[in-house]
Amino acid sequence: MFERPRGTRDFNPSQAASHRFVERAFRRTAEAFGCREVLTPTFENVELFKAKSGPGILEEMFTFKDKGGRDLALRPEFTASIIRFYNSELRSEPKPLKVFTLGNCFRYEEPQMGRYREFWQWNCEIIGAPSLESDSDVIALADAGLKQVGLKKTELRIGHIGMLRKFLAFPPHDQATVLHLLDKKRFADLKTALARLGAEQLFDIVSSVAQLKGGPEVLDKAQSLLGQAAKESVEYLRMLGGQLALYGIKDFVYDLGVVRGLDYYTGMVFEIDSPNLGAEKQVGGGGAYTLTNVLGGEATSSTGFAIGIDRVVLSAGQEGVRMAPRPLDAYVIPIGQPMRARAFEIVMHLRMAGLCADVDLMGRGPSKNLDYANSVKARTSVLIGEKEAAKGVVALRDMESGKQTEVSVQDLVAALKGGGEPKAHKTGKKPTRRATKP
């Protein structure tokens, strides 16, 4: 007996169906917004992630040496890979470049509810578009994706890192330290860090700004606290609110504590919570950034986000979203050994027509096969015996109602795709209901 590695999971059919349900919803939404899918490697050179996030990221990654002695890492996220891809091969694509990807990522961290060492993300990036337009489109895309899944209890929080960057006129390394502590709400450590920088007097102002959350009134408070440093960012957030209204998005809050303390974030930042998840309620976030130049290309404005599929599945379950697997449209049951060959012909006919169909592989009798069809929640059973074969029909049974009707083989696909009660086979006589037993 072997155990799976810590922080990983096995997905049973029901869990896998929930996962794919969410993925399909995200894929449909991204495509509806004009995004195109890209695929990037599952592992990259370690230096790529160090250049994006700093050497501290090493502690959070699964790293290894290949047989050539090269330092590689399983991807901890997608943005670095996409920007590397853009710099090397996609720069000549028409702008804006709108791309998305869905896949698994890896981080070496302590597993807990909704947080695993192997996890799945939906990632979208808009590269090369004006800030206001790309920021609003990205937020609308993330919001629409969660609505497509069926989530209703989410909170969208929008901030702007630019005002604090301008106010905290420290060298880049020190500014990054302060912003990281603000991001994590570690106010005691923040006070210590500001004292070390000889700027302890800024603590009350900065901590107050980081706790501003609400409607447009918090933008006025931010400007009164930060002065001219906040003017441009506050004006931008007001314009962004107006732009989001065009998308029908009015139910959001300004949260100036959304900092996302990474060096490459430059402007608008946002996070989305699902309150029914408790302490680990954040399901996604993103913002405006400039990373192309950090990874060796020309500076290009970009906006993107990542949403955790694992947490969205949990949240959808909490809200009662039905994420059942695709039902089996038909289970084909041969009655008697001579009909097995005909049953396989019929099931392949249904499959090639795009229906989800299965057939008895065990050589069971009709009653046990009907029990099996019930247990796998097949919508219908297709019974084929010598009498039915001689007439060119099958017996089509609705597994929910128990009603059974004769349908010609050539009409079977149409009957199954039409939904509801199957149409009776026209014989010139009144259709006769089969008995409960075949």
Image (cartoon, grey):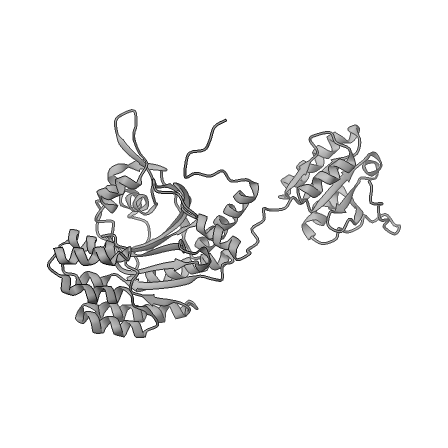
Q: Is residue 152 visible?
A: yes
Q: Please report the residue visible at 20 percent of the width from the left and 60 percent of the height from the top.
A: 165
4, above or below 145, in the image:
above
419, above or below 137, in the image:
above
View extreme (left): residue: 198
Give the quadrant of residue 277: bottom left
Q: Quadrant of the C terminus?
A: top right
Q: Is residue 104 visible?
A: no
View extreme (top): residue: 67
Q: Is residue 3 left or right of residue 221?
A: right
Q: Please report the residue visible at 30 percent of the width from the left and 45 percent of the height from the top.
A: 80
Q: Is residue 299 left or right of residue 386?
A: left
Q: How many marks?
A: 0
Give the quadrant of residue 209: bottom left
Q: Position of residue 57 (x, y in %)?
A: 26, 43
Q: Please report the residue visible at 68 percent of the width from the left and 44 percent of the height from the top.
A: 378
Q: Position of residue 75 (x, y in %)?
A: 34, 40
207, above or below 366, in the image:
below
Along the viewing direction, whichever of 119 and 3 lies nearer the viewer: 3
Q: Is residue 220 left or right of residue 281?
A: left
Q: Position of residue 331 (x, y in %)?
A: 70, 40
Along the viewing direction, whichever of 391 and 27 lies nearer the viewer: 27
Q: Position of residue 423 (x, y in %)?
A: 77, 51
Along the viewing direction, whichever of 112 and 108 lies nearer the viewer: 112
View extreme (front): residue: 188
Give the quadrant of residue 109: top left
Along the viewing direction, whichever of 341 and 104 lies nearer the viewer: 104
Q: Is residue 367 left or right of residue 54?
A: right
135, above or below 371, in the image:
below
